[in-house]
Image (cartoon, rainbow, N blue to C red):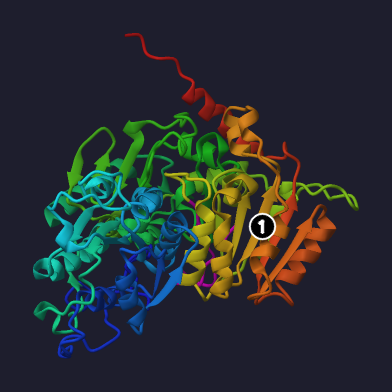
Amino acid sequence: MDTGIGAVDGPKAAPSGALACPATFAASSSHASSAEATMGRHLARRLVQVGVSDVFAVPGDFNLTLLDHLIAEPGLRLIGCCNELNAGYAADGYARAKGVGACAVTFTVGGLSVLNAIAGAYSENLPLICIVGGPNSNDYGTNRILHHTIGLPDFTQELRAFQTVTCYQAVVNNLDDAHEQIDKAISTALKESKPVYISVSCNLPGVSHPTFSRDPVPYFLSPRMSNQMGLEAAVEATVQFLDKSVKPVMVAGPKLRVAKAGAAFAELADASGYAVATMPSAKGMVAETLPRFLGTYWGAVSTAFCAEIVESADAYLFAGPIFNDYSSVGYSFLLKKEKAVIVQPDRVTVGNGPAFGCIMMKDFLSALAQRVTKNTTAYENYKRIFVPDGEPPESEPGEPLRVNVLFKHVQKMLTGDSAVIAETGDSWFNCQKLKLPDGCGLVVRASRYEFQMQYGSIGWSVGALLGYAQGSKDKRVIACIGDGSFQVTAQDVSTMLRCEQNSIIFLINNGGYTIEVEIHDGPYNVIKNWNYTGLVDAIHNGEGKCWTAKVTCEEELTAAIETATGEKQDCLCFIEVIAHKDDTSKELLEWGSRVSAANSRPPNPQ
């Protein structure tokens, strides 16, 4: 079930204007038997209600009885992962596909292992429900020392670690308030679009309690509303600001997802006539077939001619931007605050001021589209200077495969039924250059694109691929992963096989951490080479559908892609691409030098 909770355009509104999460069962009138009136059943049904069909889990003695209840829920599938970090990454990928994700681990050793993935989901504004099996309720306050702890009679270490990377924490060690705590945690994740933490004492999931005697009533979450007077004032100030400019542009940022404003952004793009670009972390959130789409605005490593148009504009509207050292290419943007309208999910700032709060981005962009004067000057300037991209030089027969040739072929693979996941590294830059196709109009089966720009945790893509593919069974996912990143999280290829997924993994083997090399080189960036296809064959072990290939030249790559998209299209396909260690995109070379300069700035004088 797709509730639309995490979609770029948001859910279809309920008649009253509130967000109703549909249930998959008759919830309001059905009674549970005394044996079924348990907290474990309630939690499982809540997950199904909000759109979670798969929970990524690693069993441990503190969560086993809870896992029994998750398994017993008809609408829920428990997917066992190889480690907690990958379970968290999988829940992250699933949330990107379905709008909300969930993982379940054990106390402290599991919780602290999954913490890195939860932090990444927090940075990317993803609603993720992290469930931890906790100590027996009788052990709280007894001064006892338990296993899976650091040897102190203090059970709050895990909770304190989660407080900074989740928007709500519930420690359920008493059935009297368990119903309230669970419901508040899950609803908060949906409303805030952030992860939450739920710790459940290991002896409570199967105990009946009268508060769980009815099936849970589906959530009815009131959306945040704009201050109407503030909205009108913000639109008026912005119209005056933009209409006096000569060549305005608009740029989409990654917070379009959390603001559910993708359709409103496209509406404004159509009404305004402005040239349109996306920040790198917003790729895939705006249709790249919009009439005046320029490409990715990423400072010095932008799509050709995009930065020139954006940075020379006399006004720019940024919708949901995140300006950090990576997205600004080491703080080297040539933007001026006084020329910018910054639209955040609940706030608008026009130039150096004024600023308006309690303004929802979706409302603001739609209202602005009704008022703004059409101006296509920036795009007309772009057409005057634009020179089409060239094709990579043709390869000689048997010539070692170049990375730009690989991505030429990846481009040809993309359809409306595909999705792309890019790992941290040179794949960031090569995948940014892919042109994502779609169908007709704005409501389309578009190619989706995901990567983790803000947090940038290497290894994220393996778990995220598992979760995204599980949540998007109507798409075939193509993942581009470097060898260094793959070594961090490779184990859960086995879980992909257990789930009968048919993703295509391009493993780019260039012998090290290439992105780190371009920032600051050293012997620590060289890794031990693996027999990657041999490893995946060993994981396969004859169980499930898997096909592997190792390619060293374009002819072998072409044959491998033909097989992966033809006779092996129902298999998990793993293609190891042998590349030269110095074969990188020109964008990575430029970006790496600028980030290096930012990292190596000397201390300010004291």
Image coordinates of residue 36 in percent, x first then y, are 21, 85
Image coordinates of residue 134 in percent, x first then y, are 26, 60
- Up/down of 23 relative to 179, above or below: below
Residue at 26% from the left image edge and 52% from the top image edge: 146
- Determine whether, in the image, residue 600 is placed left or right of residue 322: right
Residue 336 located within the stretch drawn in magenta: no
Q: Is residue 408 visible?
A: no
Between residues 173 and 325, which one lies in front from this camera angle? 173
Q: Main secondary structure of the magenta part?
A: loop
Q: Could you tell me how many numbered marks the image carries?
A: 1
Dot 1: element: strand
- Up/down of 501 relative to 165, above or below: below
- Determine whether, in the image, residue 227 is placed left or right of residue 560: left
Most distant residue in the front direction: 144
Image coordinates of residue 82 in percent, x first then y, are 50, 61
Magenta region: 434-451
Kind of residue at badge 1? Phe
Between residues 167 and 16, which one lies in front from this camera angle? 167
Residue 438 located within the stretch drawn in magenta: yes
- Up/down of 28 relative to 459, above or below: below
| Residue indicated by mark 1 | 506
Rendered image quadrant of residue 185 = bottom left
Residue at 85% from the left image edge and 50% from the top image edge: 395
Image coordinates of residue 421 in percent, x first then y, are 55, 57
Instruction: Bin the neighbour count of mark 1 within 10 Å (Cα to Cα): few under 14, some 14-19, many 20 and up.
Output: many
- Up/down of 149 relative to 447, above or below: above
